[in-house]
Image (spheres, helix red, strand yellow):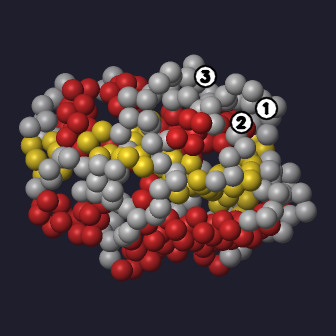
Amino acid sequence: MRSGSMDNGVMPGADSAPRTIAITGASGLVGSALCESLLRDGHRVRHLVRRTPEDDSEIFWDPASGKLDPDQLRGVDAVVHLAGENVGAKRWTDAQKARILDSRVQGTTTLCRAVARLDAPPRVLVSASAIGYYGSRGNEVIDEDAVSGEGFLTEVCLAWEGATEVLQGSPVRVAKLRTGLVMAQGGMLERILPVFRFGLGGKLGSGDQYMSWIALTDLVRLYRHLIFSSEINDSVNGVAPNPVTNAEFAHILARVLSRPAWFTVPKVALKIALGELSQEALGSLRIMPNRALSDGFEFQFPDLETALRHELGGT
């Protein structure tokens, strides 16, 4: 796979004229990186916030109560929807699972209803989703044409993506980006890096389960591709074209950090520590980004070691 040569994420043929992009979840790992990229290239970014706006770069919304004034979105060229309760931040109690589901469905519904009420709506909505849509599929190589799987995250993704159907039949193009594990200083890596740096890293369970991942740099570029360069009106897998097994991941990360990876975390220990969430840690997804590749997107970091060395800055 050829790697791209354009760091800013604007693919060949993209409309480089300054645009106004509204973003939910702009302060998160992906949102902050996307905002920085857009602002650096002269685009205007408007954050949707749940407090009193400080200036006209912010738009008030309250997704839990369905409050978002459509007039505040007038003049916006594109909307990126990233907001949602952190899936792995807390143990999955019934209450936490409800927060995870409600935050995504309520936010997406509120946003899409406001967009649908505009006479001149944004031309595109790029809404985050997740590869949890597919469930756990073992060694099966799957792409966007695969049917949905089973499990809590599948239910969340189905409802999350389903909430965008408010815009079906409208002039707004809707791209749903099913994101894999994001390789970056924050997120999942932030939790496991200390363990690996102390030489205590290793595989989870058998280590045979596949992990579908993407470098944060490429994820930002893919969001930008879907905003500026694409006509995709469908789901898109936000993963690199080279998934790895969990054992391979552990050894590659250890090599990047110049540390050993001799340990194994038993399944029973994961279940005790994580509860139901352990099923996701032990699940296997071998996913290909066929729709993005067919649409002309080129990954700068298609292999894991190169991605980790770039994202960790030689850590």
Of labels 2 and 3, earlier in sequence is: 3
Report which residue position mark 1 lands on: 15
Amino acid at pointer 3: Met
Instruction: Write down the residue under mark 3.
Output: 6
Helix, strand or loop at mark 3: loop
What is the spatial separation of the Cα atoms under label 1 and label 2, in whole angstroms? 7 Å
Measured in 3D between alpha carbons, the distance from the residue under mark 2 to the one under mark 3, in whole angstroms, is 13 Å
The residue drawn where x is 78% and y is 56% is: 172
From the viewer's perspective, is residue 171 above or below residue 95?
above
Of pointers 1 and 3, the one earlier in the residue sequence: 3
Q: Could you say whether the residue bearing mark 2 is in a helix, strand or loop?
A: helix
Q: Is residue 116 above or below residue 286?
A: below
Q: Residue 229: x and y, percent?
A: 71, 36
Q: Position of residue 290 (x, y in %)?
A: 52, 41
Q: Is residue 314 left or right of residue 38?
A: left
Q: Residue at x 91, y 62 (%)?
A: 119
Front position among marks 2 and 3:
2
Q: Which amino acid type corresponds to the residue marked 1 in the rendered image?
A: Asp
Between circles 1 and 2, the one closer to the viewer is 2
Q: Pick whichever, 219 or 237, lies toward us.
A: 237
Residue drawn 41% across the image and 65% down it: 149
Horizontal side of residue 300 vs 279, given as left or right: right
Residue 229's label in the rendered image is 2
Query: What label does residue 29 carry, if any?
Result: none
Callout count: 3
Residue contact between numbered discs 1 and 2, judged by CB atoms under 8 Å: yes
Q: Amino acid at mark 2?
A: Ser
